[in-house]
Image (cartoon, helix red, strand yellow):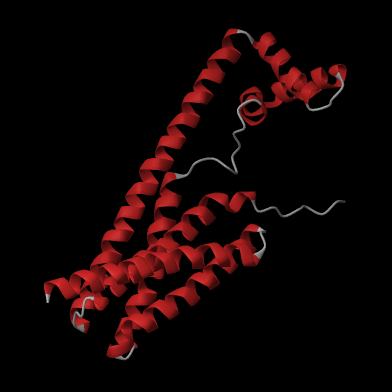
Amino acid sequence: MPQPQRHRTGRIGWLRAGVLGANDGIVSTASLVVGVAAAGTARPEILLAGIAGMVAGALSMAAGEYVSVSSQADTEQAELEIERAELAADGDSEEQELAAIYVKRGVEPAVALTVAQQLMAHDALAAHARDELGLSEQLAARPLQAALASAAMFAVGASLPIATVVFAPFPFIVAVVSGVSLICLAALGAVSAHVGGAPAWIGTARVTFWGAAAMAATAAVGALFGTSVR
């Protein structure tokens, strides 16, 4: 008996939302903290800004993911309804359409027609959803899963720079938060790339670069406007 193969496509939904949430949690909260600290603010105010950013960001990520993925799910359902109506109206034409898809993929016409007939006899809508529309159960949009994964991972990511503010020596908060956050971003990029089956250095490089750019920009803004206010 052949052993079942383990693929990563089933992880795409929650992995994308989780990585996006964790990455945004680290980058946005660390950038906020660094910007406020660079303005010469005291530690309690820096912590307050970080915690407020974490709460607002997690809720924003959850709402954004839920709305966007719900829109995707609505579109998928609308396409399935159209396909269901077409199957009810003219099943023979849909059978020929499905067979033509297999022919384009290299299957002989007679075999393609036999496969189309057998698949439609088993589950016509599933066959057309998969092979005509490109929809499958594994890759189906799941709004609640995406929202929860994104919000939870945002909070986890945001807690790292906040915890660093608590323990870092006050004169070096900007440097320590930036360094710890970049290390965490690099680790996140490597892990997410590994889980997704991509080379680890690619994930590490891209999240570290953009995280460093965001923190440098907010530090510059904080230093500039902090000096202006004082």
User: 149 above or below 99?
Assistant: below
Position of 14 compared to 61: left or right? right
Position of 63 compared to 138: left or right? left
Residue sitting nearer the eye, 227 or 191: 227
Q: Position of residue 94 (x, y in %)?
A: 66, 14
Q: Position of residue 180 (x, y in %)?
A: 44, 80
Position of 102 compared to 201: left or right? right
Residue at x 70% of width, y 15% of height: 97
Residue at x 83% of width, y 27% of height: 106
Q: Position of residue 181 (x, y in %)?
A: 43, 75
User: 146 above or below 184?
Assistant: above
Residue 90: image quadrant is top right
> How many labels were placed on the picture?
0
Position of 129 compared to 117: left or right? left
Q: Quadrant of the C terminus?
A: bottom left
Residue at x 58% of width, y 42% of height: 139
User: 96 above or below 138?
Assistant: above
Residue 109: image quadrant is top right
Residue at x 35% of width, y 54% of height: 61
